[in-house]
Amino acid sequence: MTTTTQTDFFTVARERHSVKSYDPTHKLSEQEVRDLVAVANLAPSAWNLQHWQFVAIHDQAAKEKLLPIAYGQKQIVESSVVFAVLGDLEANRNAETVYGGAIAAGAMSEEIKQTLVGQINSAYAHVPTLARDEAIRNASLAAMQLMLAARASGLDSCPIGGYDAAKFVEAFQVPDRYIPIMLITVGKALNPARPSSRLPVEDKIVWNGF
Ligand SMILES: Cc1cc2nc3c(=O)[nH]c(=O)nc-3n(C[C@H](O)[C@H](O)[C@H](O)COP(=O)(O)O)c2cc1C
């Protein structure tokens, strides 16, 4: 990573801002990209199904291809890497592998595995909104963790919803299994982010129900 300084979580959370202007000469190695995804991959997920997939758009040519799809936002080509965060509509298919690992580690019995796999496959088969809801909910947690990992590594980021998801799917040949959640640019800020404010905390808490 760019810096080895350890920063506490509260500083990381306070200092993460959506940066829109990056140093175009700053590069991230594939290993540095992998390190960010490895931290994002530690996010929690329902049934531990890990409903996320990251497309690392790292080559300049791939960023140029993405630029018009993201309505010409310059941060796409100036950042060091753009992640397309995808949600997995068939994350139930991960259950065997995930729980197989838990069994091998002695953390789960075969009986519990079978019960869980049965519950998961039944939910995916019978609740029509579940696959999409879970894909969006869980992949978004990993997306946030990626942005915090970037800041903790001395990097900056910006989540992007302003892009044509259908065109992205076509241009980057995204299989039907996945849905686009957001893009995230990551790099070294050239200019600081525009200041942003938050509504008062008391406006965001309702105690013990509405
Ligand atoms: C889902 C989502 C979509 C966003 N889309 C864009 C975008 O398309 N372009 C952009 O420049 N910023 C985008 N942003 C960044 C927001 O403008 C930014 O998070 C917000 O203004 C608060 O600023 P802060 O992140 O610096 O605290 C998006 C943020 C989120 C969470």
Image (cartoon, rainbow, N blue to C red):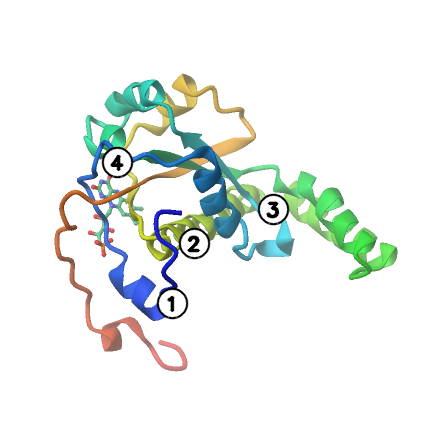
Q: Nearer the viewer, mark 4 or mark 3?
A: 4
Badge 1 is on which residue? 9
Instruction: Left or right? Give the position of 23 relative to 63.
Output: left
Instruction: Sort mark 3 into few (<14), some (14-19) or many (20+) by Cα contacts within 10 Å.
Output: few
Dot 4 falls on a residue whose secondary structure is loop
Q: Nearer the viewer, residue 206 or 97?
A: 97
**Gap in angstroms between the C-alphas marked 3 and 1:** 37 Å
Q: Position of residue 188 (x, y in %)?
A: 25, 43
Give the quarter of the image for residue 82: top left
> Could you tell me the amino acid type at mark 3?
Val
| Mark in the foreground, 3 or 1 | 1
Q: Which residue is mark 2?
A: 145
For the residues labelled 4 and 3, the Cα–Cα distance comes to 30 Å
Disc 4 under 8 Å from ligand 1? The reply is yes
> Who comes first in sequence, dot 4 or dot 2?
2
Mark 2, secondary structure of its residue: helix
Compute the Cα span from label 3 to label 2. Answer: 28 Å
Q: Secondary structure at mark 3?
A: loop
- Residues at marks 1 and 4 touching, judged by CB atoms closer than 8 Å: no
- Evaluate if marks 3 and 1 touch, with contact meaning CB atoms under 8 Å apart: no
The quarter in which the C terminus is drawn is bottom left
Q: Which residue is mark 4?
A: 162
Residue found 21% across the figure and 46% down from its top: 19
